[in-house]
Amino acid sequence: MGGVYCFEGLRAGGLIPATAADFEAARPPASTWVEVSGRLLRQADIALGESPNPGAPPWTSHYMPVVSDAWRPGRPVAVFLQVSDFGLGAVQPGKPVQGLISVSGLPGPVRARFVEAGLTPAEHYVLVEVGTDPAFERWAGLVILAIGGVVILAGLGLWLWRWRRQGN
């Protein structure tokens, strides 16, 4: 997991403005750190409760389409936003939002509900994780990798200690 965060943070590049029209025309920006503008379809918000692990309290992610002014119902959607409950205040109609383009895409149940609603994702759609930035992703990835490394070294040390204690 730490490697994924580091990868996302390192591959991002600089902040680049992008419009929903750019994505609809298959003209993605050179960076994965974007400031997206377009027409927010806030009424199509799909909320999904998620939990990092069993027993942990869930949080809610909201998924919303962003389209260009030229977009019409029935056409594929090229941009979706993923926003936590805490970030909903930053997502306002007519206001650009910043975030990283996700490597994972829409969760299956969310994608199915968008398709049912007539908001089918385009072949090369993007999911923008609102509020994330490369510096935080790199930092989080390094922390997770460091903790994993300490756990592995401690486990190896314990194994060697028990092995030597048994007289091997």
Image (cartoon, grey):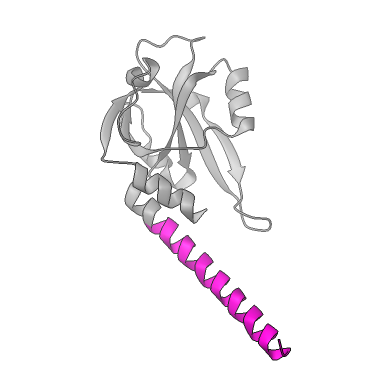
Assign the C terminus to one quadrant of the image: bottom right
Majority SS type along the magenta span: helix
Asked which quadrant contains residue 110, the reply is top right
Residue 164 within the magenta-colored segment of the rendering: yes
Looking at the image, is 82 positioned above or below residue 22?
below
Along the viewing direction, whichever of 150 and 60 lies nearer the viewer: 150
Farthest front residue in view: 168
Along the viewing direction, whichever of 45 and 28 lies nearer the viewer: 28
Question: Residue drawn 31% across and 28% down?
Answer: 29
Where in the figure is residue 157, as x and y percent of width and height? Answer: 59, 80
Residue 153 falls left or right of residue 26: right
Where in the figure is residue 137, as x and y percent of width and height? Answer: 39, 51
Where in the figure is residue 149, as x and y percent of width and height? Answer: 51, 68
Report if residue 132 is visible in the image.
Answer: no
Report if residue 85 is visible in the image.
Answer: yes
Looking at the image, is 38 positioned above or below residue 3?
above
Farthest right residue in view: 166
Residue 153 within the magenta-colored segment of the rendering: yes
Total numbered labels:
0
Asked which quadrant contains residue 46, the reply is top right
Where in the figure is residue 160, as x and y percent of width and height? Answer: 63, 81
Question: Residue drawn 26% across and 38% down?
Answer: 15
Magenta segment range? 139-168
Asked which quadrant contains residue 107, the reply is top right
Question: Residue drawn 38% across and 44% down?
Answer: 131
Residue 18 falls left or right of residue 139: left
